[in-house]
């Protein structure tokens, strides 16, 4: 796949000005946030992506968006849980340090999987640990070695959002915390875990948007990037 | 000290209608919330309390309030940290189960001390553990025996408010959680730990108002009350 | 039914790490919060539960979740109002003190029923009183004897959420308050009764999450647990 | 005192355009909200009021404001608790129905007193009942006759704000509810009782701004106004 | 129709404890808030209402609720705009003063109609004025005579919610303000007009819950009630 | 098309009091906000509009609303992206300065298109630039000439809402900022970009309601209006 | 005064990078927001301003800030009400259209005066109208001619914030609305009027930050700027 | 200085359980958050720190706290702007990558300085750039080389909080964003920039608490830590 500079085609001109030189400028592929776009718009973008051969992720893709992408990029990888499509389907060979994605509960899997796949498609090796919330501390404490071997850790949690602070107190790597919109009414669609994470007693926690697995995986990949000589 | 029914005196009639039969109706002494009252009003209430000989707590007492109480009840016990006065000064002989008050940080001491003293003045034995927040899990884990021997546990925490949920996952006793207004800006004066506690993943946590050590100590004393035959 | 330690099977490994020794550690059965999980995930958990013979509750179960549970645990008890499944279907023989669940209005029945059933499945005797909101005080005042005979009281209310504070003023038992998302716009999906309950003038009220009947029933069962010798 | 039309004097022209024909247009005297005004501005207004002989209230008056008013209207009535000045000092002869002001707690006295005095200065007979909050229901229940004899009732409460709904369930007169900024942290400076009152289960409650005793007294006076033939 | 005391029948006992003596205690009929109740529950209540012959309103009735009511009370009046059913269908003969309901915009009609019908079924004469928002002041100014002849005014408005304060400045009757959940995003489902109305510069405005036409009509009927001799 | 004064017909009288002299009073056509109105109501208004020949916009029109308008005004222009209908379909000949509408992302197109069309139908020339968000500054910096040639600029953005402040720092024309409800959870349906825009470091930004392309286009048209001699 | 390009002096380098070519880039002078800066920092900036001879405003200047400015720019104009200093003290000769600043109440004077002076120092003629809130509509209606002769109108209001929408409905010029933090508790420090203004029913209103008279005056000056040939 | 394990002394036992093995467990020194602690408590901690010779930071230290620290650790470094004390006073020899701290405005200096010093005391080389907010883009664009040479970037901003997203779009290093409580009313004490930063369009931004320079400096030091072989 040759990545070449390009100009948006006619169909795209009125709806999007893709930032496809991001790879050269920032070192990471473009991502297309599908929510709020029509399937036709996403399809037009996918067509351009294919024509130019630029590595691209499509995030928050509903069924219609996915169909539109696959019509133009039939070999794209599509993860239903993460609602993510990636093209080309295979991530690059991993470099840098390892990323560990930790999900407090099963309901946090969609967001955690998105973070996991994004980290991989940005060039890191990445693993996933699920259902180790603080209500049963033995679950996370039994993972200390795995936690301490990661260069960057993403912790995904809804409800009380307490897990990232607990993890940060156990390791020296930085923790990226992702609140999810999972929980009873007073979780207020993710506001509660968001505030918990921002107020973490343990230093070494920084927070991304509610349900934003993409942002967390991206940040973790940057942190664990190979250090230039 | 004989507790007798009474009628408010003349000075008190226009400002307060004390609920002094609460002891007989609910089994616990009256409490006077001083904040928002003038020192003169609190003094008038203290005079009546002394005249009638009714066990009473004065909570959230500023310096002026304290002086007004002590003018009429010179032997009242006054705890500066908890901003609490109690009359008579000695708690009753403890009955029922034990109460344990746990404070996540040193800054939570005023609220925790209020809970501790209230539980004692309502007739329970009560102990205090301080500075065992989740940023260093070994601190709370080293207290497991003490935690598991309590009949009711009060956990006081600001910032991320994560400690009550962690404690609840370790014990079978009910946990009363008290958020405090301690922390950086996004703690929003206690809103963040309040939401964390309400969203605790572990069942067995119920929450009282921000900085309300009185309410927590009262609730714990009720939970640990001796079971009637 | 023999409760034995177990290890999660293959199908479960990537989605959940059940805390099935909670019974031994905390003395209460596991609960699976179904909302946010797929039916397939809940089904896999149910299969493991059956294979191991561990007492388990499934809360917030939608129709799909219920079908998935019943496919693996056909004799599970299913309460449609509470959206709760329990396996084994019969609660244990009640011990400890009595729990009383009080619902302010008919619309609060789903949450109140969840609390009622959870208390029973955790081993308490429990009763339900419905539609005794403060707009007609005679309704709650006519229940004083029933209220005063309970060891723990759960009060469920939406709208103004005033009932728990009124009840707490009438009894010496602790009151667990549950706000519900019932009411006009300015109830803000349960925020209004949540705040009311946290600000209860009467001490002896602690609060759980909006619509969280499970948490309230669990807390009440802990409070009313038999006191160890 | 002759009430005559007038034009603002020179000193006043750049800072205020008094609505002094309000008495004729709406039937009630002007009120000057002092907070946010300088003492000099309030003094200039008081001078004009005196010059024109127009019945006027000065609300939310701090010490400086009060001195400025009294410099120009030395016979004005000044209530320190309510932070209210009235000129002329004597209310008009009462007409219409009676107004009853009910305060849940002693800390609500400043707001309740403001409502009481405003109702009187707008021409109603008005009485005050204090410290009858719902934590001890017997206190309000013992006042049923007094409650039922009023044409309009103002209920002032902070914390849980539950009293107005309870009162409305006991009477047929309309209840004006006033939340106060009294209470622990999660009262959020009056937001909690405000929401409680807006969500009152009992119909017959309408709400004014936090701590707005003036607005409540005014509204009650309008409701209890003599019915024109 | 004879209104007699009654006891709830068997079917009703577990779901509702109707406050059917409200008519005698407060002077106004019972209202059943349908939202959050099942159609079966509402039907059971309607059956009892019919059996006892007690004047009753059913508010916030969806299609299913309406069918359930009409199955038992086939002659009930059903207003689709207001989502209200009334039985018996005819309001009582009007007494007391007149009620005027004012709606700022066409979108406010459902709430305004509910207020209008409730006022009538509580025994007042009531009229409706629509689409007189402050964006074109001439519309409300041309109604001054009508506004000034009412004993109580209900003003319903969404978006900026400015109309009640403007109306209150023009009349001497009390204004009950009802915010509606109509408007662009920053109306926050009615929060914006709610705050506007609570902060009305003109005294003489009190506020009920968002979209609560029932509460406003009820309050207005109480205000305009005939004065007892 | 002759614009003549008119009176609402019979069908309209009870639902709307159109402000059709707005054109003469303010110089701009009437707009009918369709959301919250029934299709029948919108149809009745459209019929009157056609009968009177008054230039009118229908905003926030769903499919049903659009059908109802087109039934009475079959030649109306209908833009599906903007959910806007305009009658007569052609905008007036442009006068005054130019309006530039800038959309941060493709998802902001519906709101941006509404602003664009409204500005045109109010008599301005207007252009649209899309997908120039601050994540890739070169995109907006390459448009400096176009930005600096406009008399008024509308900037539409969701998520962080940072674009209006950046644009305002580059030009001397006033910027009207429109937050959109596009983004992850902590965008809180547009609250985040709304606050960002209100807090713009660069002066020269004023803000309209979330997703309110109509208001922005209207304001821009007023700013760019021809200056009277 | 010659405006020349410059480089920050030594003292300034570590604390501020003034944007002094703003005049050439945007056409308006620099403004220094004093709040949050130390007096020493403001003094250092003032020294540079004087050395370079660049027209500059100092906003939100407390007493200490003012002294620091006047020490270096002794002829600067200082308005105490607006907390504004301007140097050089005289505004430029006015060009373009007229700006009218309207304040709803006397308490809004500080913010309104800031807007007035900023508009003048940015080169517009500007007038002020005070105390014309909607509680007495005759006050604003008597100013119609003045309102309709302005090219841009700033409306400053606290409490209900209703005045900007009412003004916008009366004129064809754009209205810049400024909420102030004046009012009772539920004004929430300006949140209530902010929301009111964003939700204005009348188009032609755009909003700046709470108490931001500077931003409003700046925006109005831009709108009323002379149109380039 | 020898860092040895230790046990809290008598004076400390009841108020704090220092986590002094954090250095060994996590690799970073202890920090004592002074706000909410009394000077006596902070002094007792400082005494222990000195006795044990453990590297420690004291953050958010008011004048009283600082005096208490210096009484026991007279050679501690004290930065007044950052309200930070460090002991021993000299940071360790820097290792790992470089940290760059960027402050949008002069008012953000206290928080930015705290981040800068913390990064240095945790062992990184760190630089500071001030007053490069987005209102004048040329300021940040002229720093591209400096920005691109950092291994981790901390961006501190109040008001609109737009700078971190703009910076993240220009570099490949991760950006830690710190909102400050600087700005007009609708910044809501830092809530506005907090939300902006969480919603950053550019990936590569994660957020810490409002005004939490300590947390940001700590996180940046972890990100830029030397990679273990």
Image (tube, coloured by chain):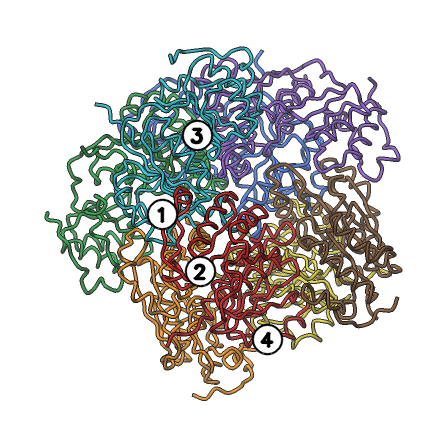
Chain colours: A brown, B blue, C purple, D green, E cyan, F red, G orange, H yellow
* Vertical side of G78 occupied by A167: above or below: above
Q: In the visual, does C116 lie left or right of D77?
A: right
Q: Measure the C-alpha gap from mark 1 to mark 3.
A: 37 Å
Kindly indicate whether the residues beneath marks 1 and 2 are on one polypeptide chain: no
Indicate the quadrant containing the C terminus of chain E: top left, top right, bottom left or bottom right.
top left
Element marked by disc 3: strand
Closer-to-camera residue (G11/B98) = G11
Within 10 Å of disc 3 (Cα), the crowding (few <14, some 14-19, many 20+) is: many
Closer-to-camera residue (H173/C132) = C132
Kindly indicate whether the residues beneath marks 1 and 3 are on one polypeptide chain: no
Element marked by disc 4: helix
User: Does residue B70 appear in this view?
Assistant: no
Which of label 3 and label 2 is nearer to you? 2
* Vertical side of B172 occupied by F41: above or below: below
The answer to the question of whether label 4 and label 3 lie on touching residues, with beta carbons closer than 8 A, is no
The chain that hosts pointer 1 is E
Q: Measure the C-alpha gap from mark 4 to mark 1.
A: 44 Å
Within 10 Å of disc 2 (Cα), the crowding (few <14, some 14-19, many 20+) is: some
Indicate the quadrant containing the N terminus of chain E: top left, top right, bottom left or bottom right.
top left
The chain that hosts pointer 2 is F
Residue ID for mark 1 = E200
Residue ID for mark 3 = B31
The answer to the question of whether label 4 and label 2 lie on touching residues, with beta carbons closer than 8 A, is no
Residue H32 at x, y percent in the picture: 62, 53
Residue ID for mark 2 = F29
Residue F146's tag is 4
Residue C131 at x, y percent in the picture: 51, 21
Q: In the visual, does D110 lie left or right of B198?
A: left
The answer to the question of whether label 4 and label 1 lie on touching residues, with beta carbons closer than 8 A, is no
Kindly indicate whether the residues beneath marks 4 and 1 are on one polypeptide chain: no
Residue E99's tag is none
> Based on the displayed image, in which of its 4 quarters is residue G158 positioned?
bottom left
């Amino acid at each position: 796949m040759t990545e070449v500079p390009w100009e948006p085609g006619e169909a795209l001109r009125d709806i999007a000005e893709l930032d496809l030189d991001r790879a050269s400028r920032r070192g990471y592929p473009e991502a297309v946030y599908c929510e709020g776009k029509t399937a036709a718009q996403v399809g037009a973008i996918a067509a351009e992506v294919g024509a130019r051969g630029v590595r691209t992720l499509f995030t928050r893709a509903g069924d219609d968006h996915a169909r539109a992408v696959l019509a133009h990029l039939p070999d794209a990888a599509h993860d239903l849980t993460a609602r993510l499509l990636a093209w080309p389907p295979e991530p690059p060979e991993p470099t840098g340090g390892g990323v560990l994605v930790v999900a407090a509960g099963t309901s946090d899997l969609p967001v955690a999987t998105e973070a996991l796949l994004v980290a991989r498609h940005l060039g890191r090796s990445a693993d996933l640990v699920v259902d180790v919330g603080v209500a049963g501390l033995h679950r996370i404490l039994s993972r200390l070695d795995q936690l301490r071997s990661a260069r960057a850790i993403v912790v995904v949690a809804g409800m009380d959002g307490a897990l990232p602070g607990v993890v940060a107190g156990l390791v020296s790597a930085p923790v990226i915390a992702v609140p999810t919109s999972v929980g009873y009414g007073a979780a207020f669609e993710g506001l509660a875990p968001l505030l918990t994470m921002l107020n973490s007693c343990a230093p070494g926690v920084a927070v991304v948007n509610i349900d934003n697995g993409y942002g967390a995986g991206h940040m973790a990949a940057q942190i664990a990037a190979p250090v230039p000589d």
